[in-house]
Amino acid sequence: MKYAIILPDGAADEPVPALDGRTPLDAAQIPNIDWIAENGRQGLVRTVPDGMTPGSEVATLSLLGYDPQRCPFGRAPLEAAARDIRCGTNDLIFRCNLVTIVDGRMADFAAGHIGQVEASALIDHLNAQFGDATLRFHAGVSYRNLMTLAGAGGLDVRCALPHSIPDEPVAKHAPCGPGAERIVAVERRAAELLRDHEINQVRRDLGENPANAIWLWGQGVPCVFEPFAQRFGLRGAVVAAVDLIRGIAVSLGLDVLDVPGATGYLDTNYRGKGEAAVRALDDHDLVVVHIEAPDEAGHSGNASAKVAALEHIDQWIVAPLLNHLHGLPEWRILIAPDHPTPVAKRVHTSDPPPFCMAGTNVSPGHGIPFSEANAAAAGLCVDPGYELIEYFLRV
């Protein structure tokens, strides 16, 4: 049996007035995903347990069969695993966003999706000015960077998610808890260094959002997971551009496949991801393809971009995978958004997203296209969400 799992990050949504009251899934032309729903099963899956923040780390671990309530993790350590960044047992790893703060408000958690060359230069500048043996910044992809802090194991700091506070006063969401003053001091010093940097002066002149501050969050220490192959008896591969998903893959012992031009944004190489996924099934039992673009469109409040991203996923990833799987004796495919990122709210929500699956021995359901409403009407809700993969693999 060959298995394919497609994770369109943040694809689930709510009715959008600009789309005539439809959701992006309703509005998008996604014939291949609809075929899976019409010829298989669809339903809802609770990927975020009650009381947990609806982050992609929580939801993705659920979809891959791991109970997030029993996983001692932070988002930043998972991203660090993707880059083989190591630290001591008394150290903390933080996600370090380059952000735009205007008049004391979170104007842009991604600093205008700053280019890689500019972002790396700013991270280098921070290291040169006040990085040392205890504090180090690590360049990532665009606005997504990391910071390691030595001797911080005793800190019990609570940090807000920058993408969850659009346009809100940042002072209201400043780090708090024991040791928070150390984190606040780092953010304050970074803002002083970034404010008048020549890169940001040019960005302002061009009408682009400056990366005039950093936001530290998602902290934690490295952790160990039960390998996926040991848990499910399958050799798997992951196609993903963002370090979070790549780090989860590394932590679970899944092979990570690189795709040139995969950006983790709206301009990602959809075709390349689809081709890599098809090739992966030659020597793997299972392939997971993650696409960040719908989530980015949701955070930007851009309904048309979200529709376009879904159509690209259907055309360049789902279609070639389905075509390949149809030529195999036994196969299954699963489409599973990790969480909703409604364009009207621009933040993640904890509502159970829809999923659909089809393939060998998957009994057909109601024969209707894929959407949030149709999935809810199907009457199937997998709760807790980490049981979905067992249902998908063993049903």
Image (tube, helix red, strand yellow):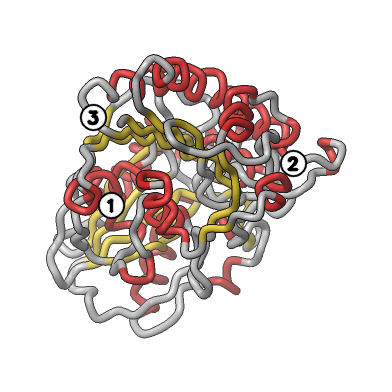
Q: Which residue is mark 3?
A: 284
Three-letter residue code for mark 1? Phe
Q: Secondary structure at mark 3?
A: loop
Q: Secondary structure at mark 2?
A: loop
Q: Quadrant of residue 274?
A: top left
Gap between marks 2 and 1 measured at Cα: 39 Å
Quadrant including the N terminus: top left
Label ID, residue 137: 1
Give the label, 2 or 1, closer to the camera: 2
Residue 330 lies, in percent from the top left, at 35, 27
Residue 166 lies, in percent from the top left, at 64, 56
Q: Earlier in the sequence, mark 1 or mark 3?
A: 1
Q: Residue furthest bottom?
A: 178
Q: Residues within 10 Å of mark 3 (few under 14, many from 20)?
A: some
Give the label, 1 or 3, closer to the camera: 3
Asked whether the viewer can see residue 161, the reply is no
Three-letter residue code for mark 3? His
Q: Earlier in the sequence, mark 2 or mark 1?
A: 2
Residue drawn at x 30%, y 49% as measured from the top left: 248
Gap between marks 2 and 3 measured at Cα: 35 Å
Nearest to the observer: residue 127 or residue 343: 343
